[in-house]
Amino acid sequence: MSFMGNKVDASEISLTIIAEIQHGVLPEKSLFPTERDLSERFSVSRTVIREALLRVQLEGYSKSEPGKRARVCKPSIADFIMSTASKMRNSLGDNDTVPQMEQIRLYLESGAIKEVAVKATNMQIANIKARLDENYKAIGSTDFAITDRNFHKAIMDVVGNNIIIALYGEYIDDMLSNRPTWQEQKEHDRLVYKEHHSIYEAILNEDAQLASDLISAHLERSYRSRLLTPLPSAFDS
C-alpha cells in the first residue's frame, strides 16, 4: 500500500501494521521493520512511527526485549482479556470496572462448576484436592492468594475453555491482591479455605447444584469483603 503524498497519523499507521500482521504480510516472530524503513514508507517522522509502534504493542501485536528490535506476535486470549479490562478501567475507573469483572467471573464459575461436578475424572479431582491441600498449608502466609487462585484454576481447567482459563491469569491475580490489608489475614484465610473445602466436597459427591450454589456464595462473600472499610481512627481509642 502506498502512502506517498497522503498525510497519515500514528493511528492509521498502527492499524495498517496490525492488518498486515493479521494477514501474514508480517509473519509472527519476525522482526519489525526498522523505524527508518517505516518512516520512509509512510513519509512521516520517526516520532510518529514510535507512537504507531507503541499502539501496536498495546494491542498485543508486538513483543520486545531490552536492547533488541521488537518481534511480531499475535495477542492471546489472556492478552485480549487484559487489554479489555485495562480499557474498561481507563474509561470507567476501578469503582465501576471491578464489580463488572467480578460479576463476569461469578457467572462463568457458577455455570462451569456444574459441568465440573459431573465431568471431572479421578485424576482431575485429585489435582483439585492437591491445590486444596496447598491452600490449607498456606493459611496465614503471603502465598495464600496464589493457592486461592490455583484452587479455582484447577476447577476451571476441567472445563477446558480457554477464555475461562485465561481469566485466571494476571487479572484474577490483580483482584486477589487487592484484598484490604487491614483485615485479619489468618481469620480471612481460614474462612476462604473452609468455603473451598465445601466446594471440593460438592464436586467429589457429584452434586452440581450444590457446587454452583457454594461457589456463587463464596465469590459474592469474597467481593463484599473487599467493600468493607476500617473504622475511622477516631473510633479506635
Image: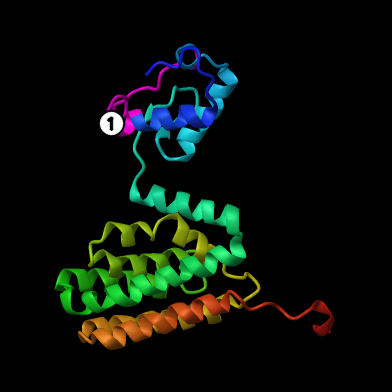
User: Closest to the observer: 116 or 140?
Assistant: 116
Q: Is residue 49 visible?
A: yes
Amino acid type of disc 1? His
Please tell me in which quadrant of the rendered image residue 182 appears: bottom right
Q: How many marks?
A: 1
On the image, the x and y values in percent for residue 156 come to: 29, 67
91 relative to 132 in the view: left or right: right
Placement of 51 over or under 137, stated as above or below: above
On the image, the x and y values in percent for residue 165 come to: 32, 60
48 relative to 146 in the view: left or right: right
**Quadrant where the image shows the N terminus:** top left
Placement of 69 over or under 23, stated as above or below: above
Q: Is 24 covered by the magenta stretch?
A: yes
Q: Residue at x 35, y 70 (%)?
A: 108
Question: What residue does disc 1 label?
Answer: 23
Q: Is 124 covered by the magenta stretch?
A: no
151 relative to 12 in the view: left or right: left
On the image, the x and y values in percent for residue 234 come to: 84, 81
Label 1's element?
loop
Magenta span? 20-36
The extreme front residue here reads 5
Q: Residue at x 40, y 16 (%)?
A: 2
On the image, the x and y values in percent for residue 79 come to: 40, 47
